[in-house]
Amino acid sequence: MRYAKGRKEETRRRVIAAASRRFRRDGIDATGLAGVMADAGLTHGGFYAHFASKDELVRAALAASLAATRDRLAAEAKRAREEGADGLEAIVRTYLGAAHRDRPEAGCAMAALAAEIARQDAPTRDVAADAIWQIVSIIAAELPADASDQTSRQTAYAIFSVMVGTLQLARVTGDPALSEVLLRSGREAALTIAGRGLRAGRT
Amino acid sequence: MRYAKGRKEETRRRVIAAASRRFRRDGIDATGLAGVMADAGLTHGGFYAHFASKDELVRAALAASLAATRDRLAAEAKRAREEGADGLEAIVRTYLGAAHRDRPEAGCAMAALAAEIARQDAPTRDVAADAIWQIVSIIAAELPADASDQTSRQTAYAIFSVMVGTLQLARVTGDPALSEVLLRSGREAALTIAGRGLRAGRT
DNA sequence: TGTACATCAGTGAACGCGCGTTCACTGATGTAC
DNA sequence: TGTACATCAGTGAACGCGCGTTCACTGATGTAC
């Protein structure tokens, strides 16, 4: 079956999309290639026409979904600013909302996979670290401009940490009321960190 | 081999300890029972004399290691207070330190496994949720007493979220300098949240 | 005190299964003539 | 315009392997006599 131009690229994109959903839903290790390929409407044998290994797919899937998260947050911030609202608050509300908590497979890969990514080999961790840098840049861009770039980045890292940590804890608890309290606490903490900045040299 | 009284309980403890290290180091799904039993100095067949299933071991291992984390943090806080230092700062420095970052297998199971725990069945998530509650209580006890219990708990949840999120991000990056910056930002953010408390009704 | 027996923690082979990866094959389509 | 051929994305069987779980067995020790 020799197919039309661009078809292979389209199939590759479809496999990456299917994988990135499965990875976020079930974990990387728990996801089998046969299931991913079936989601993409293919049989498992064709996998190696597109990727050299599962590892390469993992890297591609992480890069794709983290770029999507970055773009989503940037878009929400921009929209809020255009409406005269606070960009950071929009980011925090989007990330720490019930919809994101309830659909890990469509959400941020760091919230779904951070610890598992930390166990991957260096190239895979580098892909994730680059993506974190970009997401943190989006957050830093919403912070008061009077702080230095370095201070803004550090504050942004801390904000992203609360976001990731809060979403994970909210997903662990089965109690909807507690989960809501957690999300709200996380949102408020993120804004508290942003509003106050970070104190120097305390710890 | 009928063994002395208490030997079975001691073996069970040994298996739980080995499992809890492996789970934190490699992930729950990626950990095989044969490896756990070998670490405990046994062959894999004997596993079911102690546990009904891998799931039961997971619950026991999570409960044990999270209780250890709780006790460790409580002890650090107590020691600091007795020395006239700040209990919360001691907790934060212990948790967000290089030693904890570099030895996930000996550290907090939430930092190593939160997302994977969120994918477990309800009984397992309940074990983790209970343990989170206890750790959060330890943190809340170090907060200013003038806040209501409920406010303290919410602040403590947010602090624990920064702690978990920061450690995970620090473990992803391969850059030691960035990792140090991340840990410091997380420590400062935790204290910022504690010092300011949470603003009500903003988000 | 000495012997026979029951117990049961631990052994190691076996089970069915899904994994990542390989490979000989298929057949729809673009290209050459 | 019509035919023959080369390409190569995708198929499906097969591979060796490790998984969780089961089970017939072993043998050191506590208990009964």
Image (spheres, coloured by chain):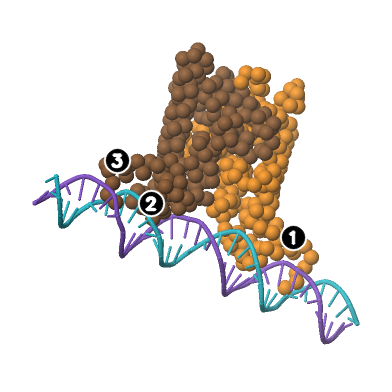
Chain colours: A brown, B orange, C purple, D cyan
Q: Which mark is residue A6?
A: 3
Category of crowding for the residue at label 1, using alpha-carbon neighbours closer than 10 angstroms: few (below 14), some (14–19), many (at least 20) = few
Q: Is residue A122 above or below residue A195?
A: below
Q: Quadrant of the C terminus of chain A?
A: top right
What residue sits 62% from the left and 62% below the top?
B37
Amino acid type at image mark 3: Gly
User: Label 1 lies in what chain?
Assistant: B
Residue A121 seen in the figure: no
Q: Is residue A42 above or below residue A190?
A: below
Q: What element does badge 1 sit on?
A: helix
User: Label 3 lies in what chain?
Assistant: A
Amino acid type at image mark 2: Phe
- How far from the left and from the top, in percent, is residue A55? 42, 49
Q: Please name whichever residue, B96 or A11, is drawn nearer the observer in this view of the structure.
A: A11
| 3D distance between C-alphas at marks 3 and 1 | 63 Å
Amino acid type at image mark 1: Glu
Q: Nearer the viewer, mark 2 or mark 1?
A: 2
| 3D distance between C-alphas at marks 2 and 1 | 48 Å
Q: Please name whichever residue, B93 or A48, is drawn nearer the observer in this view of the structure.
A: A48
- How far from the left and from the top, in percent, is residue B29? 56, 52
Residue with the mark numbered 1: B9
Q: What element does badge 3 sit on?
A: loop
Q: Nearer the viewer, mark 2 or mark 3?
A: 3
User: Label 2 lies in what chain?
Assistant: A
Q: Please name whichever residue, B186 or A49, is drawn nearer the observer in this view of the structure.
A: A49
Residue with the mark numbered 2: A47
Callout 2 and callout 3 share a chain: yes
Residue B140 seen in the figure: yes
Q: Within the image, what quadrant is residue B135 found in? A: top right
Q: What element does badge 2 sit on?
A: helix
